[in-house]
Amino acid sequence: RGIMEELGPTYIKAGQMMSVRPDVLGPRAMAELAGLQDAVRRFPSDVAREALRQELGRPPEEVFSELSEEPVAAASLSQVYRGRLAADGREVAVKVQRPQILETVSKDLYVLRRAAEVYQGVIDRVLPQQRTDYTALLNEWAIGFYSELDFLNEAKNQARMREELMAQVPGIYVPEVVMELCTRRVVVTEWIDGVKLSECENSEIKDLVALGQECFLVQLLRMGFFHADPHPGNLIRPDDQSKGKLALIDFGLIARISERDRETIVSCIVHIANRDFAALTEDFVQLGMLPPDADRAKVQGLAERVLSPYLYGGGGVASAFQNTPGGFQALTGDLVSAMSDVPFSVPAYFAVLGRAVAVLEGIALTGDPSYRLVLESYPFVARELASAGGGERPGLRRALAELITSDGGQLQPRRLSNLISSAMGSVAAQGTFFDPDAVAEDPPDLQQQLRFLLSEQGRALREGFVEEEAVEAADLLVRQALRRAFASLPVPPSLPFLPTANQLPVPTLLPTVDGSWQPALAAPAKVVEMAAPALSPQEEVYARGMSDLTAGALGLEDIGVEAVASRLAPALVSNAAGGSTSIAGPAGTQGGLEEV
């Protein structure tokens, strides 16, 4: 680490990149390189002013009425000065690139490229199971590094983030870019007075972490364009809270993730919750972490062994994890260590994603030692599934189907209810993960869940799944209600050698194959059996769940499923015949079907 800091900007950046690559270095080396700092000497301010004159095409005094004598911050690629625009008096941050940095970086990258080729040859002979292409990795990183050296890219990144992110996450602020003053070596943005998030009081950190988490998840899972360097100095609590509660700065390092990979990440979360390790292994292949010819059975066993303690609680790994409740780093570290015997690699975006998550998690834990990253993030994921599960995002629709339906494709009312509860902020936990089958400690009532389902947030969930199940659910409920209502009818006494009253043929209308009706004689019991066949055990479970859901929606949850069924039967029959019947609720209240 010390040698890399002495070698300068390129090697510092390379070390920082490798510190988040578990497929390149071991845990001890990664931990050491994580401490790399942009500890470089400041360059003279007169050199910076000359660079401003060359880039802006005029003396800095004509552009800035004020400009600090010394930089307020310095890093490996640039220095930042505080200034004021002569044109309108706005305070601005002026970032100036180090002199001759492009030439220095280019020479360093040439040396590193040759070294990577040699290293690749050694690894191919010594560790043939390791599939990481180190030459390609360096090439990809070099392209990103060159992009970071062009400050016009940073200015465009910040302008886009300001336009898109602030519209989606109220409370987040991204400083304005003075685009007409930005060049390849200079970027000028609005100055923000404030305090670094990591230096705020713990109570403030706890309040702001939820906003920062929402901000990051929107970038990652919705925009596919995220700030890849959210270190503590880039997250600021502005003094002027009218602009926003949390400000993001420095958009030199941005990562992009495709729609397909975003949907696969959500699928990973669902498959872990479902304990479906076979499907999780396929997700790893889809993400490029495993080659198509990977030993799936071996990976599945490793994943189950590593993740089970986190899902069920207890065990050695879980005990260590519980000492750091948010421990996303512990989970990923354990998983990567277990995968050392199989060929795997980490996509470039996933490496910077891991670093970003680790930084945010570390800040969150300082404000709330009981913070649990996965549980705190799941309400956002649940909202994304509920609102975007329609045909426009087929990957999310598949993930949603796996979460709330059985293997046979039948909607599971309890899981549907739990998903809605989670989307509303009440998550049931088991171990250190969410449990889709458990009930949260303080869930929203069924009336609130129904309102969510009928809102715009639940549109795709409603249109994509609930309405498809409505016909089947209605059929089961009516069959259940009719059979119970018929069974509860008083039967007149009869002689032993004569049929009972409900076995005597009576005039009735029966449907024909062409859809018409014809008169016939049939026993009431036969008619009921034809109209409402007995429910299978699976249908009984489903009907009971739907009865509970219906009872809650109608305000009848206190009177039991049987009472709901008996009251529902005449109402459904009346509605089918074109009438309108209300259902009496407890204590004489009324709950009309139209309400539902």
Image: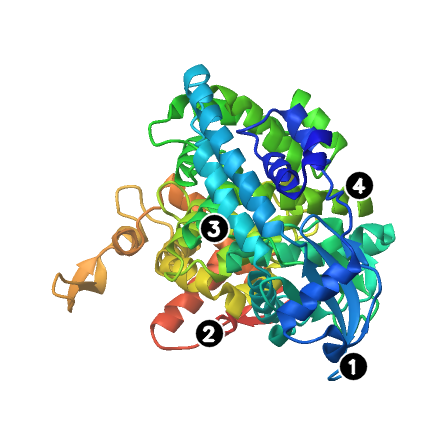
Position of the N terminus by quadrant = top right
Q: Identify the element where label 1 is drawn.
A: loop
Can the viewer see residue 580 in this picture? yes
Q: Identify the element where label 4 is drawn.
A: loop
Residue underneath mark 2: 581
Residue underneath mark 1: 89
Identify the amino acid type marked 4.
Pro
Identify the amino acid type marked 1.
Gly
Residue underneath mark 4: 369
Residue underneath mark 3: 262
Label 4 – label 1 distance at C-alpha:
43 Å
Can the viewer see residue 382 in this picture? no
Farthest residue in the bottom direction?
Answer: 88
Left or right: 53 in relation to 68 = left
Front residue of this view, candidates 427 and 415? 427
Label 4 – label 2 distance at C-alpha:
54 Å
Identify the amino acid type marked 3.
Arg
Please give the label number shown on residue 460. none
> Which quadrant of the structure image shows residue 66?
bottom right
| Tag in front: 4 or 1 | 1
Which badge, 1 or 2, is on the more N-terminal residue? Answer: 1
Which badge, 4 or 3, is on the more N-terminal residue? Answer: 3
Measured as percent of width and height from the top left, residue 32 is found at: 70, 29
Label 1 – label 2 distance at C-alpha:
70 Å
> Which quadrant of the structure image shows residue 169?
bottom right
Farthest residue in the right direction?
Answer: 201
Measured as percent of width and height from the top left, residue 433 is found at: 62, 38
Does 322 sit above or below residue 372? above
Which badge, 4 or 2, is on the more N-terminal residue? Answer: 4
